[in-house]
Image (cartoon, helix red, strand yellow):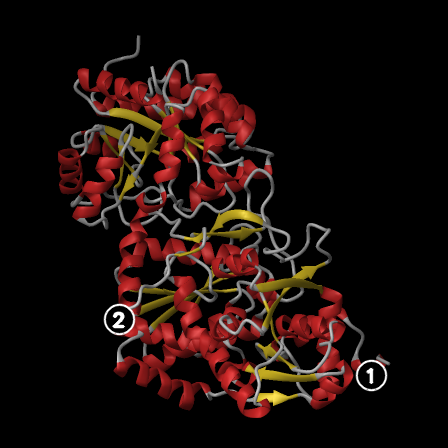
């Protein structure tokens, strides 16, 4: 049985109350066993195929390629059930919860995508589901709140702090501290105490495994670059992982620059953060000199988080992946541009990766693979509030 | 005397009176700087044997709603680590002070060595880091020991026996037994299994064993004082400090609660 990483270089670890340590030990052991159990893997693969709709296509975006000046393939996670890559993790962890005999599942959500994915997976497997969500996010994301309720989940409002994702994660962890014996916590990104960063990566690496195989089939070659947006970093670590040993493949993570990296209002934990502890792991966090965690900012709720997965911090330090950032305005423009060029409305998160690509065309031969982590229907209200109606554009 | 020795002496003094040590918790800078200082002095005046001093942090995972809200309010009122150090300086010559600081606060100020220097210079005797379990604690424990500060570990009802032995072995100052599975906050009942947990811990620890989380009345304190070497009261007192209305009001409120609690512990009157 292969070991599950507790640390990624100096990063990671388990900075949680002592009460949770046995639950994390139990989870680590359960995942080490499950991921090598043929029956579990077969069930997971069946659900990926028949429920999530995998493999998702690797789509040659011709008009986007023309615009950029080199071939671009989109990994279409927006076509996965519930409209984003989050379902890969939610189904895997819900299956693990059932295997561990935990009848109750909790999750946190910001924009609601992970909450909807977890509620979906729990409905599928008949598990009780409670989703913690900041009241500010509940206000902004009413349709997703209704979706979760329709799926049978309880949405538990969080009033603390700025009433957004960071506080929702804290509330979920506090619930878990009190209820770990009966409850599994499905964390939504490759963050949190060990084994979560490794567990979530293991469940998301299917994105990269498919993409690598599909790229080889289409081009008989590996991509020059693999590009993905990074908030907590789960879609990015998922698509990067199978390419890490391919030294010739560049890995580019695109963070949210918000209103600018030189302002206090951004979500770029890797480029504008410091070494620190948030939500159970040591990584790169947005904090002040006092050590207080600051509120992140991004137009995209999924990138609006002051921490990032510890494995990304290691990939940054080693130089194996490079991290860049894109502002709200550029992401918004890319959101509209991809919609018009390809008939694909991308999530605002994924729009950050598109925006970077639009300004950083590949030089020489080769091609890019970009992870289109989710669909943008959820962002319509945010976008229409920020830009003129389409009829007034151009 | 080193911090560790001062903590030991405080527990011994209480034991000599045939009672458990009383360790009230407070949040530095809550609801504001002056009230925090007044509360610390009131704790010392009311006969606290040790003081647990919370350093406000933005994301306190081990804390329930009362202490979380207090931290948020203290930060909003401008509290910093400096505010907590100042409280420590004000009372450390009267009562041993044990900081309660989250891992990121310990690491942010130039690393655990730097934090230890600052806490030690302010007269602190020890530090509790509620999100630094045994496996992550080695380096911090050494850095603290270098400054004579005790790194006090937490031990939970969920902790398996073998791990409990390891925690007791690594403990400095005292072992902080978490009474219930959950975060800090007042509870209506003391769990029945607590006695067993405290007995087992006492049998393995070379240090005193104190109990906290969920103790909200003098009666509960008295009950826990029958089995433990020390009793920690947090949320109930933080609530009193917040409701006091003024530094004086807060000091009176916490002072009278502590007086009742000392009675319940069987302590004599304060000279």
Nearer the observer, disc 2 or disc 1? 2
Among all residues in the image, which is located at the extreme top? B271
In the image, residue B189 sits, relative to residue A90, either above or below, namely above
Q: Give the percent coordinates (x, y) of residue B90.
A: 48, 17
Rendering quarter of residue B189: top left
Q: Nearer the viewer, residue B58 or B41?
A: B58
> Residue A265 is drawn in which quadrant?
bottom right
Which residue is nearer to you in this view: A90 or A182? A90
- The picture places residue B193, in percent across and down from the top left corner, at 16, 45
> Is B163 placed above or below A79 here?
above
- Residue under the image location 59 percent in, 48 percent down: A294
**Residue A206: which quarter of the image?**
bottom left
> Of the residues under marks 2 and 1, which one precedes in the sequence?
2
Tell me if residue B197 comes above or below residue B258 in the rendering: below
Q: Quadrant of the C terminus of chain B?
A: top left
Q: Residue at x 33, y 17 (%)?
A: B47
Residue A167: tell me if it is visible: yes
Q: State the residue position of label 1.
A: A391
**Can residue A149 be seen by looking at this rendering?**
no
Residue B188: x, y in percent?
27, 44
Which mark is drawn over residue A33? Answer: 2
Where disc 2 sits, the SS reads: helix
Tell me whether the residue at label 2 lies in contact with that at label 1, contact meaning CB atoms closer than 8 angstroms: no
Label 2 – label 1 distance at C-alpha: 55 Å
Element at badge 1? helix
Horizontal side of residue B57 vs B190, given as left or right: right
Looking at the image, residue B167 sits to the left or right of residue B26; the answer is left
């Amino acid at each position: 049985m292969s070991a599950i990483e507790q640390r990624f270089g100096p990063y990671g670890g388990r900075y949680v109350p002592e009460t949770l340590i046995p639950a994390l030990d139990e989870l680590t052991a359960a995942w080490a066993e499950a991921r090598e159990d043929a029956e579990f893997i077969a069930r997971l693969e069946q659900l990926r195929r028949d429920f999530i709709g995998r493999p998702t296509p690797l789509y040659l975006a011709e008009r986007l390629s023309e615009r950029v000046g080199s071939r671009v393939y989109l990994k279409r996670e927006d076509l996965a059930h519930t409209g984003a890559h989050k379902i890969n993790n939610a189904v895997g962890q819900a299956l693990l919860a059932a295997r561990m005999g935990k009848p109750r599942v909790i999750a946190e959500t910001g924009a609601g995508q992970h909450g909807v994915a977890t509620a979906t997976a729990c409905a599928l497997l008949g598990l009780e589901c409670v989703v913690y969500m900041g009241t500010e996010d509940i206000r902004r994301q009413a349709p997703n709140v209704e979706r979760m309720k329709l799926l049978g989940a309880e949405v538990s409002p969080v009033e603390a702090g700025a009433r957004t994702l960071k506080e929702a994660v804290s509330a979920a962890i506090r619930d878990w501290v009190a209820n770990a014996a009966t409850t599994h916590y499905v964390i939504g990104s490759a963050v949190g105490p060990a084994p979560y960063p490794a567990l979530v990566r293991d469940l998301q690496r299917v994105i990269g495994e498919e993409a690598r195989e599909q790229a080889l089939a289409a081009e008989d070659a590996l991509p020059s670059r693999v590009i993905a947006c990074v908030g907590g970093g789960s879609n990015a670590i998922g698509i990067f992982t199978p390419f890490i040993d391919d030294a010739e493949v560049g890995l580019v993570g695109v963070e949210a620059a918000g209103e600018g990296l030189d302002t206090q209002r951004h979500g770029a934990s890797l480029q504008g953060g410091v070494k620190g502890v948030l939500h159970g792991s040591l990584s790169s966090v947005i904090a002040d000199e006092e050590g207080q965690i600051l509120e992140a900012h991004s137009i995209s709720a999924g990138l609006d988080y002051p921490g990032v997965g510890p494995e990304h911090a290691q990939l940054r330090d080693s130089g194996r992946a490079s991290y860049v950032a894109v502002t709200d305005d550029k992401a918004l423009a890319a959101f509209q541009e991809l919609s018009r060029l390809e008939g694909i409305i991308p999530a605002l998160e994924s729009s950050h990766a598109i925006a970077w690509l639009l300004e950083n065309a590949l030089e020489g031969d080769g091609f890019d693979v970009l992870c289109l982590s989710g669909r943008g229907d959820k962002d319509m209200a945010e976008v229409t509030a920020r830009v003129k109606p389409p009829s007034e554009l151009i | 005397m080193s911090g560790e020795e001062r903590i030991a002496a405080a527990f011994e003094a209480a034991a000599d009176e045939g009672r458990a040590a009383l360790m009230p918790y407070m949040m530095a800078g809550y609801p504001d700087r002056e009230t925090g200082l007044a509360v610390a002095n009131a704790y010392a005046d009311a006969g606290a044997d040790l003081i647990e001093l919370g350093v406000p942090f933005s994301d306190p995972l081990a804390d329930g709603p009362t202490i979380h809200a207090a931290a948020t309010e203290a930060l909003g009122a401008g509290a910093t680590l400096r505010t907590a150090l100042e409280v420590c300086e004000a009372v450390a010559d009267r009562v041993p002070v044990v900081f309660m600081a989250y891992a990121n606060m310990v690491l942010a100020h130039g690393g655990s060595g730097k934090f230890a220097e600052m806490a030690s210079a302010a007269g602190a005797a020890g530090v509790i880091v509620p999100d630094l379990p045994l496996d992550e604690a080695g380096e911090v424990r050494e850095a603290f020991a270098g400054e004579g500060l005790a790194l006090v570990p937490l031990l939970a009802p969920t902790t398996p026996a073998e791990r409990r032995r390891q925690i007791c072995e690594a403990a400095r100052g005292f072992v902080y037994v978490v009474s219930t599975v959950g975060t800090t906050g007042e509870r209506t009942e003391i769990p029945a299994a607590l006695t067993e947990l405290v007995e087992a811990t006492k049998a393995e620890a070379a240090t005193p064993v104190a109990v906290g989380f969920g103790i909200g009345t003098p009666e509960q304190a008295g009950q826990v004082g029958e089995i433990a070497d020390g009793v920690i009261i947090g949320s109930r007192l933080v609530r009193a400090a917040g409701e006091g209305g003024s530094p004086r009001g807060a000091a009176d409120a916490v002072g009278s609660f502590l007086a009742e609690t000392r009675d319940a512990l069987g302590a004599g009157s304060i000279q």
